Image: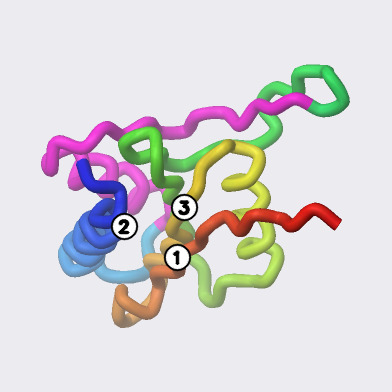
Amino acid sequence: MITDDLPHLVAGACMNVHRSLGPGLLREAYEECLALELRSLELSVRRGGPLSFEYQGHAVANAARLDLVIEDALLVQVLSVEEVSAPERQKMETLLRLGGLKAGLLVNFNVPVMRKGIERFTVKRREAG
């Protein structure tokens, strides 16, 4: 699987789910249907995995929940909200960084047009200073 194509494939799957269901359901319904859609594309999908990391040499388990990890490369966090908040965007960046993933999609299904509900995130390397 070419990693650069993965976000486009997932965005297409999101559009298929949204076209079928429309806005207004609970996020869990969209997450489950999206996982089914992605598996039908023969993509590897992990749902609801815990985020664990090390802090000062100590393991921190179950710090957060990762909605969908696709092909062990792309994090997809599913929302169904009126508007995506700044804290949700900050959380996405933190989940990517601590989860060791380089890219992610924050997907809000509660929109009239799905394209407007998909935000792409990439981990930016911090410069040593």
Above/below status of 121 relative to 1: below
In the image, taking residue 27 as reference, residue 57 lies left or right, namely right
> Residue 38 at x, y = what percent?
21, 44
Amino acid type, callout 2: Pro
Q: Which residue occupies 67% across, 50% down? A: 94
User: Pointer 1: what residue?
Assistant: 120
Residue 8 point in image, percent of width and height: 25, 61
Label 1 SS: strand
16 within the magenta span: no
User: Mark 3 — residue?
Assistant: 103
The residue carrying mark 2 is 7
Q: Is residue 54 above or below residue 79?
A: above
Q: Toward the viewer: 18 or 129?
A: 129
Q: Residues within 10 Å of mark 2 (few under 14, many from 20)?
A: some
Q: CA distance from mark 2 to mark 1?
A: 8 Å
| Residue type beneath disc 3 | Ala
- Dots 2, 1 in contact, CB < 8 A: yes
Label 1: how many residues lie within 10 Å, few (<14), some (14-19) or many (20+)? some
Mark positioned earlier in the residue sequence (2 or 3): 2
Q: Is residue 33 magenta?
A: yes
**Tag 2 and tag 3, C-beta contact below 8 Å:** yes
Callout 3 environment at 10 Å: few (<14), some (14 to 19), or many (20+)? many
